[in-house]
Amino acid sequence: MSREPNAQLIAVMEQARVSNKGLAKRMKDTAAARGINLGTTHVSVQRWRDGAGIQPQTAAIMADVLSTKLGRRIRPRDLGFFDHAQPAVPQPVGYPNTVPEVLATLGSLADETVGTPPMTS
């Protein structure tokens, strides 16, 4: 059974001018900074480009890495993945260091607020 290539992921990687190896390294570095051991390699990235599935936490890390690289918000759905990707492990508390990180944080907060039912007294 053949899968369809993930055209969205391929297009965003081309925009970011990042190779499979480059993306894998950035993802591992970002995950390590969050205390997560991620085993992503260039082979994993190629499989995702070829249409293989991805874990939600891994998709969220990939989106964060590409957001930083492109200087704009990227979500897993923008990469052709599901939209419900949330990190399984809470991220450490801290202040964002760059504008893309600030925008990603604010966007995450807005997304959580939208899905939260209104408080009643």
Image (tube, grey):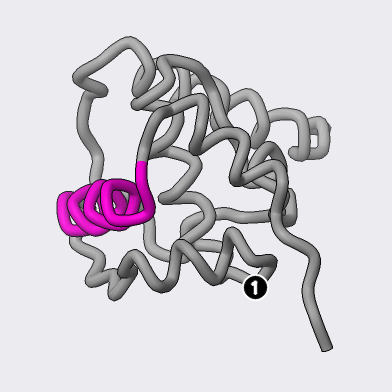
7 displayed left or right of 110: right
Between 111 and 83, the one nearer to me in the picture? 83
Horizontal and vertical percent position of residue 99: 33, 10
Q: Is residue 2 magenta?
A: no
Instruction: Kindly identify the residue that appears in the image at 51 percent across and 33 percent down.
Output: 14
Between 84 and 54, the one nearer to me in the picture? 54
Q: Is residue 32 magenta?
A: yes
Instruction: Kindly identify the residue that appears in the image at 50 percent across and 20 percent down.
Output: 106
Horizontal and vertical percent position of residue 97: 19, 19
Instruction: Kindly identify the residue that appears in the image at 22 percent across and 54 percent down.
Output: 25
Mark 1 Cα shell of 10 Å, populated few (<14), some (14-19), many (≥20): some
40 displayed left or right of 13: left
Horizontal and vertical percent position of residue 17: 39, 30
> Vertically, is 14 above or below 63?
above
The residue stretch that appears in magenta: 19-33
- The secondary structure type at the circle numbered 1 is loop
Q: Quadrant of the C terminus?
A: top right
How many numbered marks, from 0 up?
Answer: 1
Between 48 and 30, the one nearer to me in the picture? 48
State which quadrant residue 84 falls in.
Answer: bottom right
Residue with the most extreme top position: 99
> Vertically, is 82 above or below 97?
below
Between 39 and 23, the one nearer to me in the picture? 23
Q: List the residue tagged with mark 1.
A: 52
107 displayed left or right of 117: left
Q: Of the residues shown, which amino acid type is indicated by label 1? A: Ala
Instruction: Kindly identify the residue that appears in the image at 75 percent across and 38 percent down.
Output: 116
Residue 39 visible (yes or no): yes
